[in-house]
Image (cartoon, helix red, strand yellow):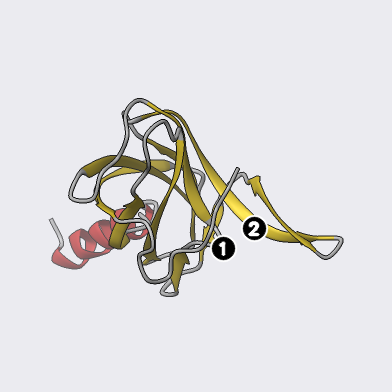
Amino acid sequence: MNKNYLVAALALIVFSLPARAEVRVEEPWVRATVPHQKVTGAFMRLTASTDAKLVAVNSPVAGTVEIHEMAMDKEVMKMRPTAGVALPAGRTVELKPGAHHVMLLDLRKPLQPGDTVPLVLTVEGRDGKRETLEVTASVRPLGTIGDAVHAR
């Protein structure tokens, strides 16, 4: 077999494979709750190697998990579910209080500082293929720096 032919064939295979959106997750955390509180927020920084989109999040600690955004509506800041968060290649996107974030709804138990919360992030690449990332978020106390009042 011709060596040049082999190199060309391997290059064709490598370049025809879909580009995976490698996503780095930094400082995932969840806001602690008070007794009987059934909702809280999850926050983190995400950096994708190629253009991608965070399209879903799941967690066994909540009955429902939604991606939310904060947006102005007639001079009033409102929170609402969104279909996802764009992750432009190489740019860090911060999910934080008062902006895009994750809402954990119908909590199964109170979350205390020091607890950890498993999260499964679903990321969609520009080719439409989805992959999941398992993340463990630490529970931080209410009033953590950067924490904003957040009611549903």
Q: Is residue 6 left or right of residue 146?
A: left
Where is 25 relative to 114, above or below? below
Identify the residue under disc 1: 98
Between 94 and 7, the residue placed more toward the observer is 94
Between 77 and 99, the residue placed more toward the observer is 77
Picture disc at residue 70: 2
Q: Pointers 1 and 2 in contact (CB under 8 A)?
A: yes
The image position of residue 72, as x and y in percent, is 76, 62
The image position of residue 101, as x and y in percent, is 50, 54
Q: Most extreme residue toward the right, as rendered?
A: 74
Amino acid found under the numbered disc labelled 1: Gly
Q: Quadrant where the N terminus lies?
A: bottom left
Residue drawn where x is 35% and y is 25% of the image:
108
Q: Alpha-carbon distance for marks 1 and 2?
A: 6 Å
Residue drawn where x is 37% and y is 43% of the image:
33
Q: Is residue 100 left or right of residue 57?
A: right
Residue drawn where x is 50% and y is 63% of the image:
148
Graded by Cα atoms within 10 Å as few (under 14), some (14 to 19) or many (20 or more), the crowding at tag 1 reads some
